[in-house]
Amino acid sequence: MAGDQDYDIPEVEDGFKSNFKAILYVWKYSIPSVIFTSAYYICDLISYHYLGDTNPPKVLAAYGLTLSWVSAFGILILYAIGAGISIYAGHAFGQRDYALLREIYKFGYFVMFLVGVVISIFLFFSADILYAIGIEEELASLC
């Protein structure tokens, strides 16, 4: 298309060498996500260890509850939206329609921003919500 850049995208063919190039191409753009996800869980492990050694068990329980709450209502929703967008983007990428691909990502960022704002408001009131669904008041207030 006019105005689109010609990207150096490896073609997938029957040969091992070209398929290996395509796999490396995908991994090159997946590495930031892998690093972020790994760092997220490594930080959790360090935090659990530190909190378990230096605080009473209720603080450790509150931290675990908070992580579960944030994961369920924050990270997982955004991951699901990202997965849906990536399928649609992959279709446009396969057709080499880079203008559509840009539009998909713009729309995806916009939707994820709006959902992120709603989730942030939801998480701001998480102590009240957790108390309302039956979590102890003291534990809910620590979240």
Image: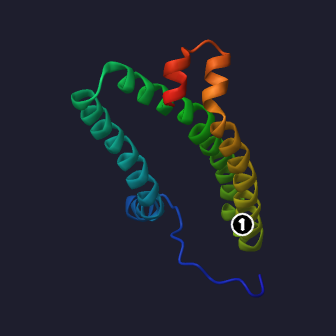
Kind of element beneath mark 1 = helix
> In the picture shown, does residue 39 fall above or below 99?
above
Amino acid type, mark 1: Leu
Q: Is residue 78 left or right of residue 42?
A: right
Q: Furthest residue to the bottom?
A: 3
Q: Tag 1: Cα neighbours inside 10 Å, few (<14), some, or many (≥20)? A: many
Q: Nearer the viewer, residue 19 or 88?
A: 88
Quarter of the picture containing the N terminus is bottom right
Residue denoted by label 1 = 101
**Quadrant in the rendering for residue 5:** bottom right
**Residue 38 shown left or right of residue 116 in the figure:** left
- Picture quadrant of residue 78: top right
Q: Is residue 107 above or below residue 77?
A: below
Q: How is the image coloured?
A: rainbow
Q: Residue at position x 23%, y 31% from top?
A: 54
Q: Residue at x 68, y 42 (%)?
A: 119
In this orientation, which residue lies closer to the viewer: 79 or 22?
Answer: 79
Q: Position of residue 47 (x, y in %)?
A: 31, 38
Residue sitting farthest toward the left: 53
Can residue 90 be seen from the camera position used here?
yes
Locate residue 89, reporting x and y percent: 69, 58
Q: Is residue 15 visible?
A: no
Residue 2 in picture, x, y percent from top left:
78, 87
Q: Residue at 39% across / 60% down in the picture?
A: 20
